Amino acid sequence: MTPAQAEISRLIDLLKIEKDEDYAQYQQKMLNTSLDERRKQGVTWYPVVKVNHFISTGERWTIELERTSHLDQNHAFQSGAVVSLFLGQDEKDSTTQGVISFIRDNKMRIVINSDELPDWIGDGKLGVNLLFDEGSYREMNKALKEVLNAEYGRLADLREIFYGAKEPSFKNGFEFQSVN
């Protein structure tokens, strides 16, 4: 293992520590914060009403929701975010996860991660919580491992150059003649 690879391996370990701490802070924030406080922080929409539901791309159920109160409060929801749809204020028994496919103003569409539409979807006040998304951590880890495991080629060369173990080299390319 080269010194550059050892340093990248250390970065992978540090990234895991950061992800674990980020998740712990998320858990602390969600578990120890009231629904009203989470709504003020912009990580919960409650209450919302189901406007529509339909089967969309990939034969997945999509639920269209609309926020009915606290319309002036900012939120952290965005397209592609992982969310939990829940019934009532309990948030434990009746939940399902999905991904936001569309959001604008006070309307949101969620693609549900199951083949069945939850049977409780019409039973009362619904809410949406923003979930911890480890996707960016997964992609960073994947990229670091790709650089770490490169044995030859341009990626391995660049790794060694960036960490100062190898001098950059340049090839004379094509000579261009002036047009004028």
Image: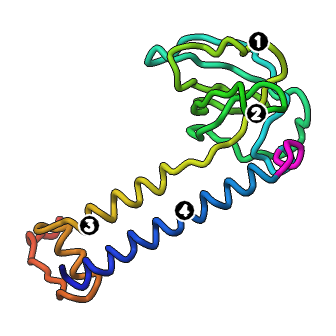
- Numbered badge on residue 91: 2
Query: What secondary structure is the stretch in magenta mostly built from?
Result: helix
> Farthest residue toward the front?
93
Real-space Cα distance between discs 1 and 2? 15 Å
Is 122 colored magenta in this rendering? Answer: no
Q: Mark 3 packing: few (<14 Cα in 10 Å), some, or many (20+)? A: some
Q: Name the amino acid, label 2.
A: Glu
Quadrant for residue 142, please give it: bottom left
Q: Is residue 77 above or below residue 17?
A: above
Q: Name the amino acid, label 1.
A: Gly
Real-space Cα distance between discs 2 and 4? 24 Å
Real-space Cα distance between discs 4 and 3? 22 Å
Residue with the mark numbered 1? 122
Residue with the mark numbered 4? 20
Residue 151, percent across and down?
A: 13, 68
Foreground mark, 3 or 2, reads 2
SS state under label 1: loop
Foreground mark, 1 or 3, reads 1
Between 73 and 115, the residue placed more toward the observer is 115
